[in-house]
Each structure stands twice: as C-alpha cells, then as structure tokens.
Amino acid sequence: MEMVKLTIDGKPIEVEENTTILQAAKKIGIDIPTLCYFQLNDMNIENRPGGCRICVVEVVGRRNLAPACSTNVAKDMVVNTHSIRVLNARRTVLELILSDHPAECLTCAKSGSCELQTMAQQLGVRELPYQGAQSTYRKDTSPAIIRDVDKCIMCRRCEMMCNEVQTVGALSAVNRGFMAVVAPAFEMNLEKSPCTYCGQCVSVCPTGALTEVDHSRNVINALADPAKTVVVQTAPAVRAALGEEFGLAPGTLVTGKMVAALRRLGFNYVFDTDFAADLTIMEEGSELLDRLTRHLKGDKSVKLPILTSCCPGWVNFFEHNFPDLMDVPSTAKSPQQMFGPIAKEYFGKKLGIERKNMVVVSIMPCLAKKYECQRDEFKVNGDPDVNYSLSTRELAHLIKFANIDFNSLPDEDFDNPLGESTGAAVIFGNTGGVIEAACRTAYELYTGKKLQKVEFNELRGLESIRHATLDFDGLPINIGIAHGLGNARKLLEDVQAGKSQFHAIEIMACPGGCIGGGGQPFHHGDSEIIKQRAAAIYREDVGKPIRKSHENPFIIKLYEEFLGKPLGEKSHKLLHTHYFDKSAGTFIEE
Amino acid sequence: MAKIKLSERKIAELKDVCKAFNNDKGELINVLHKAQSIFGYLPAELQEVIAKELNVSVAHVYGVVTFYSFFTMTPKGEHPISICLGTACYVRGAEKVLEEFKRVLKIQVGETSADGKFSLSCLRCVGACGLAPVVLVGEKVYGRVSPEGVKDIIAEYNV
C-alpha cells in the first residue's frame, strides 16, 4: 500500500492511501465533529453516507469545503479542520438541520444523550435563524420501539444497522427530498414489518427519532399499589453497564449497588435473571445432550445442530426468515420467560401470593424483551408471566427520578431463593457465554467427570462468527457462535443447505451479545465500552464461588421441590415454548 | 409471501422478467421499469414478488419506487391524459388547461378518476411547440387546446 504525506492543522502526517481525512486526523489526535458518520471499529460496522456535512474541512486549493468522513487524503494535501470558514460553515449546516427539527429538548426522551443536542452545544448554536416548513409524520408505536421521524435527521445509521448489519430489512429511506423518511415498506407501522425489535436502530440513532417504549410509569404505579407484591429480575448484562449512566467508568460492575437501588425503589423482592439462566442451562443443556445421544445412537429424526433460544430478537428473526427451521432451535424459553412462571407459580404460591397480586418486572439490556413478555403464549388467562420489561436506560432514569444517589449506595445481595446464581449464568451477557455455560454443564453430565478448567477460552472473543471443537472425553463437539443477525443468517443458510457441521450454535442478535443490546446505555460508537463490559462480565464469573449451573443449590432444590427433572412434564409446561411462522406477514391490508 | 391478488399468469410473467435480469439485485431499477411497462403501475403485491425474487427487502424496493418519480403505485386510467407544461405550452396557457382538466375530472395530477377511465399527468415538451398548448390522450395529440375545449376532449372518450 502506497503511503501519502500531508499536513493537517500544521501537523505533518504520513498515512496509507485510501485513508479518509477524518481517519488521518484522528491518528494525530485531531477530533473532527461528525453526525451522520458512525463506526464500531472492531465489528466492521460503518455508516458513511457523507450526507450531513458537519465534518467539512478546508482543503487548500479546493474551491468548496470537503466532507472529512468521505474524502480520501492525497499527496501534499494541506487541511485546515478548524478555520473560521470551517467553523461558520459547520454551524450554518447545523442551523439548517435544526430548521426542520422540533425544538422539544426539554421533554424529549433522548435529552442528555442526544448527539444533535451535543453538537448544537459544541458548535455554539444560540438561536435558530432559519424558519421554514416542518416535517410532520405520524408517530408509530410498536410493542418495543417508537418511531418519531419528525426528529429524524436522515443520517441513515438505523437503515445501515437494520439492513447491512442485521439483514432484517425492516427500514429503508423512502420518498425523496423534503418528504424523505426512514420507514418500513409501504410506510406501514413497524409492527407489521419484519422488525425483530433487536433495538440496534435505537442504539445508533443520534436523536430521539427512535426510542424504546417506556414502561417506567407502569412500574411506578405497581410499586405504589399496596395490594401488589412487586418482584424484579435483572439480566446479567445490566450490572456491567448501568454504572455508565452514573458517570462510572465503562466496565464497572455495579451488581451490589443495583440491588440496593432496586430495594430502595420499593421492589418487594430483588431477584436475578441469572437464577433463570442457570435454569435455562439445565433445560437447554439437557436438550442438547438428549439430541446428541440420540444422534450418536443413529436416530435419524434428530435435528442437529441445536440452536440457542435465549435471545428474543433472534427468535423473531428466525420466525420471520427461516420458518422451515423452526424445529431446530431449542424449545427452552429465554431466562426472562423462565423466571416469570417460576416467580408466579412456584415462589408466589409458596408464599401464598395470588397470581393477580404479583407483578414481575424485568430489567433488561434489550428492547426485544419488551415484545417477548407481551407474547400471548407467555400469558395465563391474559396475565403475563412477566408484566413489564425495562431497559438498562429506563432503570437509570427511574433511579434518578427517585432521587437515589446511586454512587453512594452500599453493596447489597439479591434475595433468596430466586436471586442465587452461578458464574455460568452471568456470562449469558456476552457473545459465546450461553454456549460456554451450556458446555460446562453438558460436559460434566455427559462424561461424568469434573472439568479441570471451567473456562472455554476458545468460545470467547468478538469475532463475528466463531467456531471451536471441544473434546467431550474423546467425543468432538463442534460449536458455532454468531452475534449480529447478519452473521446468524450466514450460519442459518448453511444449516438450511445441510452444510452445517455444528452440533450446537449460539446466536445473539446484538453485536457483542447482550452487553451491546438495544436497551443499554448509548455507546455512541465506542467499541471500547463494549469490550470493557465484556471483561466485567467475565470478572463477575471468576468472582462467583459456584461457576456451573447444575451445582446451583437453589436450582437443585427447585427441581427436588417443584419441577421434578429437566425436560420433565412440569418443565415442559412452564419452561419450554414453541415458535410461529411469521414469514407470511405482509404489508398488504386485507 | 404475500397474499397475491394478481393473476398467476401475470406473476409468472413478472418472475420471467426477474429471471431475464438473472435475479440480480443490482438490476432492481431495470426490473421495476419492465414491470411497470407490463402492469402499468407497481402495486404492493408486485413489489413483494420482486423483493423475493431479487432477494432484497420489500422496504428497499418501496424506497426505490418512491424515490423515482417515474415509478407509480397508482394504476393509470384507461385513457392517460398528459398536459405539456413546457415553456411554449406554458406561456400559451397550458396551466389554465390543466386546471380545467382537474376541475372536470375532479382529480389531481398523478391521480386516476374513480371510474378508472382517466388519469392526469404533466410532462415537459413533446416537441410539437408549434401546436402549443399540447395535450396527449394516450398516444393521440391535441393541439391549440383551450380550457373551453377540455370538455369536448373528455367527451370523445366518455362514450
């Protein structure tokens, strides 16, 4: 590759050709503001439409200003990134963008995390000099995501995420000019589109155009109702990211403070989704072993590979796109949905709490969980097993709303029995974690031997598609892992074509797994934050006295007292589910 | 995928069009062109079939259809009426002619009358400036049209 010498803000630099001015400037510590541009470095995720023109710079000898994100360096180029001409142009560009943006910052859900707001501050916008037509478009509320496209600035990050990364294809830019919006086909509501509610569009939206459906008010009302026993469960990935909302460094584990905060909010029992994750391993791991042993005995009816089913975004994805493979994923419910019936049918009954008086709330890094808990098959006579699912961000807002000084809280422990969990459960938050947890248990149950080392490092990492062969005492087990639905699609197409060599495949819809979920604090394209969260999850695992799901004493007790055995009759009724063919979903009205 | 209301034969014809372009997603615009020439417009069902054949999302197909003004999702009337708004026609009163068509047919530009007989569109110069203002009904050209003559033109087709 040819090297190119140029000067940026008086500093000489030599970079490879095909480098953009933006990338070159970054190498020497010069920050050029960007708005539509988006990148998650280590995951091959980039949005570079060159549309917003915020990143313009002056190139000496060039008549007009150049967008730094999409202009390549050239030999002997002289670039000024912060001349008065540039600064004025940037502000004018932003003022024009703002001329068609509702000035609702005081009440906007995105206020405080909005990149447009931050940019207006940074560029010193103090008035809105341009008055003109305002876009008006109906608000579209789905079970998990709200589209308020009047706040859209057409950066098209969501479109890139939905199409290139996730290959879901729910969103596209439609119409042209002033009328252009990002919308599902035929401008139908998101609910009628193949949207999986993975929430990755929300996690990259720079403004309040895409936000989650906020259920905090419902939770506050439940907490205020003396007739209700309100039980909360928290997903593994939440504890590794919640601290960011309170100014703590990414990767700070706040498990104890989170429990303390939930108790102060008034939840009667603070439990852990990790308990249900251990339960998931018992069921899903047993299913894996069952299919595997039957396969080894020559049973041709056995479907392999088995696919994990913990991720509701992924479940939606295969229901829409691979209905012919619906008998391949595990039938085990996700941990969130295993927790619900155990809380209401086991714990509640034990304490004599009537189902109608119990409210189960989940705290999730995820937006698809909001949709999942509303699915009809997870309701008993209309009462959902899990009543409300809040995102990590919503919990942070709730803590601030209740005037709780999070950082000065003491560390507290989860309540028993549904708060006790193992290290295997906490790693569910990372890509590769579910299958590692399953292998810890499956290995010991299959071989009857103790694992010498519980970590399976070959299953870890952030590579988009990974595979490893584990040695189950002479039996080679082929494991595949994908995170991000576009990567999942590749593995699924192999399964469809009968080319897959895997015995088991783990899939998580979000890049990085749940730690990079659509309900997590905004990372604004900083992949280092996702890495720090992943490291925190593995630290939490190492710190646990028990690190294998089948050794969780409360899980053992639950089977003895209530469930019987994994894959037994009661388990099937409460902990397993079935899937629906949603491929026939069409936009066309009857 | 979709609940198809188009006839099986037409669907087969559409699939042949896609096949003629090797079901290549890069040929989407060409496929849409051809499809519109066969069907006269691009209804939602048709876009779903094309999306499936070319392995792209329906949202993407719809995005392309709505971006280019040539593509339409409204069926054209039996007798498509086009009014030239080129410079010569414009200065000789084409706008008044257009207003009269809109008033008589009770439709806007880009729309089709309720009985499906007429649709209204505008174009820029048919190269018959000597006849300005010019109106096309189907392939037939009418020259020196006045607002008063509009009713007579419509009457010719309303039999």
Image (spheres, rainbow, N blue to C red):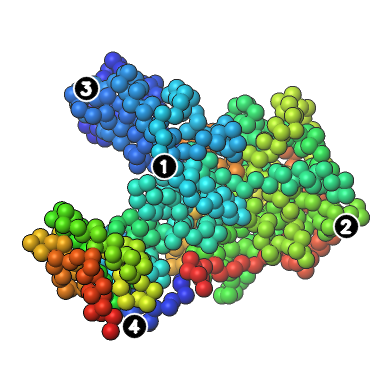
Three-letter code for the amino acid on which mark 3 is drawn: Val
Q: Chain of mark 2?
A: A
Is residue A169 visible in the rendered image? The answer is yes
Q: Which residue is mark 1?
A: A133
Query: SS at mark 2?
Result: loop
Mark 3 — residue?
A: A60
Give me the disc on residue A17. none
Q: Position of residue A54 (x, y in %)?
A: 37, 31
Foreground of the two, A65 or A331: A65
Instruction: Residue A549 in the image: state x and y as whole percent.
Output: 72, 49
Q: Are marks 1 and 3 on the same chain?
A: yes
Question: Mark on residue B9?
Answer: 4
Q: Is mark 2 in CB contact (under 8 Å) with mark 4? A: no
Marks 4 and 3: same chain?
A: no
Q: Which residue is mark 2?
A: A354
The answer to whether residue B28 is left or right of residue B127 is: right
Q: Does residue A129 appear left or right of residue A226 in this picture?
A: left
